[in-house]
Amino acid sequence: MRNYKKRIADDILKRKLEGKGAVLIEGPKWCGKTTTAEQIAKSILYMDDPEKKEQNIAMSEVNPKRLLNGKTPRLIDEWQLAPKLWDAVRFEVDHRGELGQFILTGSAVPADTKEITHSGTGRFTWLTMRPMSLFESGESSGDVSLADLFSGNINLDGSSDIDIDKLAFLVCRGGWPQSIDMRKEIALDQASDYYDAVVHSDINRADNIQKNPERVKRLMRSYARNQGGQISNSVIAQDIFANEEGSLNEDTVASYINALQKIFVIEEMPAWNPNLRSKTAIRSSNTRYYIDPSIAVAALGIGPNDLIADLKTFGFLFETLCVRDLRVYADALNGSVYHYRDKDGLECDAVVHLKNGKYGLIEIKLGGDRLIEEGAASLRSLQKKIDTDKMFAPSFLAVVTGTGDYAYKRNDGIFVIPIGCLRN
């Protein structure tokens, strides 16, 4: 049996169980939800156990309470196979009057929610898990803490051993737990296998509608080509028409993207709306991201050598890796990650905003002095626009890079931090 690698979600799960009767862990298949829940659960019900699946689903219809019996916290894995369990858990939490009773895990939103009559407010709390960050997988030294940056600790002393070749491999491999300790060729196969499962099977679970695999492939390739962009579904439809054999209309594009979101393959980034000194119009469209860069790589049918040969594509996919990691780290700090873009074209790749009002502005650059300077200039421009009479000044400004041996603070106060030394 493989050794369990500690996840940042471990501590978040413990904290959430202290405050609610049930915790719902959501996220893509194969990201480690069940394994993480197993570390703390005292009893387990595997709803999709092939030998008991039909029996479990039948029992959920006639006597769901029976499935909830067991030592607590009780893990109910892939609960969405029996949506009636939601109300049963909510009822049981109410009547037991105790916290930390249940952990539910699910790799899809239930296709049919008509049997769920209660939102779960006050009884449930949610935890989103993603593929592993570089710190969790052991590729980041963790020398630079995001929490320290927010607390004002500016004594940076971090180093990274990730060079351009290793970074290309990490983007293509992704953060899938099973692939972390595999040899390179086999590890790269895992993301392709995941993509194939999405195309041929998993996407259909979102709404129980059978989809044409070739159409799904065309959609996912176009989405991959537009990583980090704020484009509309109509533009994606046009891109497919221009670059693929065949076409998809806007409604089909919207339904496919919605299905991918329901199985947590896509996690788009909302816009940040700060108080600004000027009346600048802010673009409010979501930024398009896969939950892990390896999905985009698989959709495009490329590998590490292709990224080295095409640094523009490499840069977009590296951005997806950084967004994945920043989301994982922000969750640990009770924060969220946003993007900023206004009508004048001023952008900020990532704004990590905590619930206490503190926030940090981050530009993401593959590396090199010119790109770092471009990122720093954007950060300074945005900082000048913020009305600090109405909100906090940013806790920090940082350029997160793919390459570079050391983290350091520039003369203008902006931090330069290789992703290979960052942690929560």
Image (tube, grey):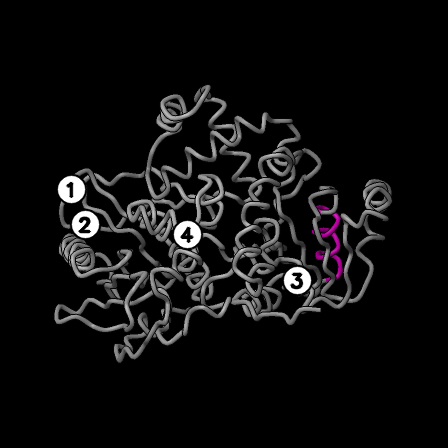
From the top left corner, tell me how far across and down residue 390 is, in percent.
21, 56
| Separation of marks 4 and 1 at Cα, in angstroms | 44 Å
- Secondary structure state at the residue bearing disc 2: loop
Q: Please tell me the numbered disc located at residue 35.
A: 3
Please give the residue where the numbered disc 4 appears in the rendered image.
Answer: 304
Answer whether residue 29 is visible to the viewer in this image. yes
- CB atoms of marks 2 and 1 within 8 Å: yes
Q: Describe the element under mark 1 as helix, strand or loop.
A: loop
Q: What is the quadrant of the C terminus in the image?
A: bottom left
Q: Check if residue 145 falls in the magenta segment.
A: no
The main secondary structure of the magenta stretch is helix
Which amino acid type is shown beneath numbered disc 2? Leu
Q: How crowded is mark 2: few (under 14 residues within 10 Å), some or many (20 or more)?
A: some
Horizontal and vertical percent for residue 362? 28, 58
Label 3 sits on a secondary structure element that is: helix
- Reading the chain from its start, which is encountered first: label 3 or label 4? 3
* Whole-number angstrom distance, CA of label 3 to CA of label 4: 29 Å
Q: How far apart are marks 2 and 3 (CA)?
A: 44 Å
Q: Name the residue under label 2.
A: 276
